[in-house]
Amino acid sequence: MKKNRVVIKVEGIVQGVGFRPFIYNLAKIHNLTGFILNSEDGVTIEVEGTEDRINKFISHIKTAPPPLAFIEDLKYEFTDFTGNYKEFKIKPSKKSKKHHTFVSPDIAICNECVKELFDKTNRRFHYFGINCINCGPRFTIIKDLPYDRENTSMETFNMCDECKNEYSDPTNRRYHSQPNCCYNCGPHISLYDNKGEKIKLKGDDEIFKYISELLLEGKIIGIKGIGGYHIVCNAEDDNVVDLLRNKKKRKRKPFAIMSKSIETIKKFCYVNKDEEALLKSKEHPIILLKWKNDTIISQNVAPGLRYLGVMLPYTGLHYLLFNYIDKNLIFTSGNISEEPIVYKDNLIFEKLGDIADYFLTYNREIVISTDDSVLMEFKGLPYMIRRSRGYTPKPIQTIETDKKILALGSQQKSTFSIYFENKIIPSQHIGDMDNYDTLQTYKTFLKHFKKLFSFEPQVIAMDMHPDYIVNKYIDEIMGNKCRIVKVQHHFAHLLSCLIDNRIKNPDEKFIGISFDGTGLGDDGNLWGGEFFIFNMKNYIRKAHFKYVPMPGGEISVKEPARMGISYLYDALGDKIYQNGFITNQLDNFELLMEIIKNRINSPLTSSVGRLFDGVSAILNICSKSDYEGEAAVLLENSITYEKHITDYYNYSVIEKDDIYIIDYKKMFLEILSDIEKNKDTETTSIKFHNTIAEIIADICKRLREKDRYKECSIIRGSISKQVSA
Ligand SMILES: [Zn+2]
Ligand SMILES: [Zn+2]
């Protein structure tokens, strides 16, 4: 059979992820000779052998690379057979000055490591820090690049001889695995009380046994994870969950749960095969799952919600914990109310000492924090709600740019992104920028990204809202030497949607629908119920929901009843005073009417987020919210999906200056009439949701048919839902 030679260049996350030993073993399997070598942009492979075997070799690389690898590009070229190679070799890497642009995210413990963890004959039996080239911490331990041990927080641990042997053996799963360690040479766990006193116990097993007893007694434990501390307690004990809510000053915002196994989760949640795959994926995110009615989990974990945020154990430490306790545990981010997750060991007693009774920690530093990622599955596809651990800093590919661009992100649920070449790397979730600590975290992350990716921006893209905290600090952060581009909030949302959908043509036109809380619009009003015709370069606002005042401004977001009154006044005018239901049910009616009528600190808004809030308040579902989006989430949760109702409320569309304005006056009058007729809340909620769907279809139809935007494509949207963690 004819022999050939091929040169293969692979780009992406291919260094420090076991790629070279993978290729080494693959070449042996296919009986190929040649070499592999780390290059500036990835790896270079040269092999010789029969054409058939070479093709199989290439297809194997493409279809089943090592778990942590991310192949961005694979090019190959056949040349003539030389017969120069006698075997397959891993050649030493050339030292390169160029920073490699890829860093692997942190990956959940792999099945092989779990097996070893519980194998009595294995030298890592019950060792919490077990990991290999295919799993374990990465992004959160890397201080700088290149990714060598001395640039990670493992630098203080010297490998023992056995670990060194694994590290230098290309056939070993731990070949060149930087975090490689074992019980003899790696980090160790310790237990402290909340005063900082070390609890003396004999060995790790005793610690885990003791913690399981504490958890059963109703104690709350701070546990060091991959990207920060979790607050952990028994999710099946109402009293403990109540206690945690009091201590965390968190009335109703849902907590996430960690469960021992998929079988355990299926006892209290519905799990389809796509959700199961996401739960077990190498990222191990929190998945929002439909909660069964009769359940062992305390109702107070996610009060009033049909969805529960659940994840599986993703480190050796988690597995060892569940080895001793047979309960589902709350695993919520270790922070006080909306502050960033605590990840520095020296801060735990000060920051979390009032919440946790004990702390389980270990002596490997977390260089940079990441929260758990949150996703949900919809029609077989994953929807990202919070992108953090397991995903950051994986790049998203898009069109080429010759600039280095930094996008600053928003005020709530903030992140930033860096953009260079054809890659966008979004930061991990940072949080709400309303407090000092979050801003400090933002600055720390940005500094880290700049160092790690040798990134110095030339252009800064920011929201046009003048009050966003990060916008104010831009000079301090960047030193005032970049070109600044201000971007309208909802245009930015729609552009992310194009990137999500891998759109590459900057001129391709779309109908964009952006429903949101609030964002500053071009006319100075607060937008949030918008229909644009747009492409990557520009947009035209073609339709929006009618403006109403937001009485008292931002406080309306926390007090949905204010919006309820605003919409009803819009619908009823002064007749509102004769409606006993409204005047009695909604708080501070008289005062709010004064504010609305005199437009005291009451900006106009077209926000659909506020519309959901208003309807939620009018239906007496939520008039004051404990967390962002609660009123809307509870309104959706009032629907059981057991009723089949296709009715919707009336509304009108007014055309003014080539813009459609959606007027919901008729809808509110009909909602009031349904309430007077004592229609059940669920029916009204369904009809309201149907109305929104009807409006979307109606406006899109008008834009496509009447306004001849027929060429506009429709693509899958991105969602943002209240985070459960
Ligand atoms: Zn592993
Ligand atoms: Zn060792």
Image (cartoon, rainbow, N blue to C red):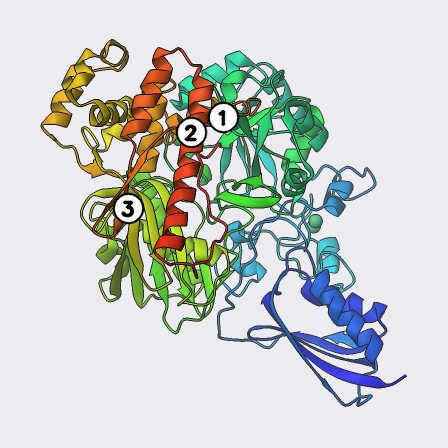
Instruction: Work out whether mark 2 precedes mark 1 in sequence or the reverse, and give the earlier one.
Output: 1
Q: Position of residue 185 (x, y in %)?
A: 66, 48
Q: Residues within 10 Å of mark 2 (few under 14, many from 20)?
A: many
Q: Amino acid at mark 2?
A: Tyr
Q: Tell me which corner region of the image, top left, top right, bottom left or bottom right, holds residue 210.
A: top right
- Residue pointed to by mark 3: 660
Q: Amino acid at mark 1?
A: Glu
Q: Nearer the viewer, mark 1 or mark 3?
A: 3
- Residue pointed to by mark 2: 648
Q: Nearer the viewer, mark 2 or mark 1?
A: 2
Q: Secondary structure at mark 1?
A: loop
Q: Nearer the viewer, residue 566 or 112?
A: 566
Q: Nearer the viewer, residue 290 or 527?
A: 527
Image side of residue 232 versus residue 318, left or right: left
Instruction: Work out whether mark 3 precedes mark 2 in sequence or the reverse, and give the earlier one.
Output: 2
Q: Please tell me whether residue 396 is drawn above or below residue 308 in the rendered image.
A: below
Q: Residue at 62% x, 17% y: name it.
A: 295
The residue positioned farthest toward the left in the image shown: 598
- Residue pointed to by mark 1: 197
Q: Residues within 10 Å of mark 3 (few under 14, many from 20)?
A: many
Q: Residues within 10 Å of mark 1 (few under 14, many from 20)?
A: few
Some atom of ligand 2 lies within 8 Å of the CB belonging to the residue at label 1: no
Q: Amino acid at mark 3?
A: Tyr
CB contact under 8 Å: marks 3 and 2 = no
Q: Secondary structure at mark 2?
A: loop
Q: Please tell me whether residue 353 is drawn above or below residue 14 in the rendered image.
A: above
Image side of residue 286 versus residue 325, left or right: left
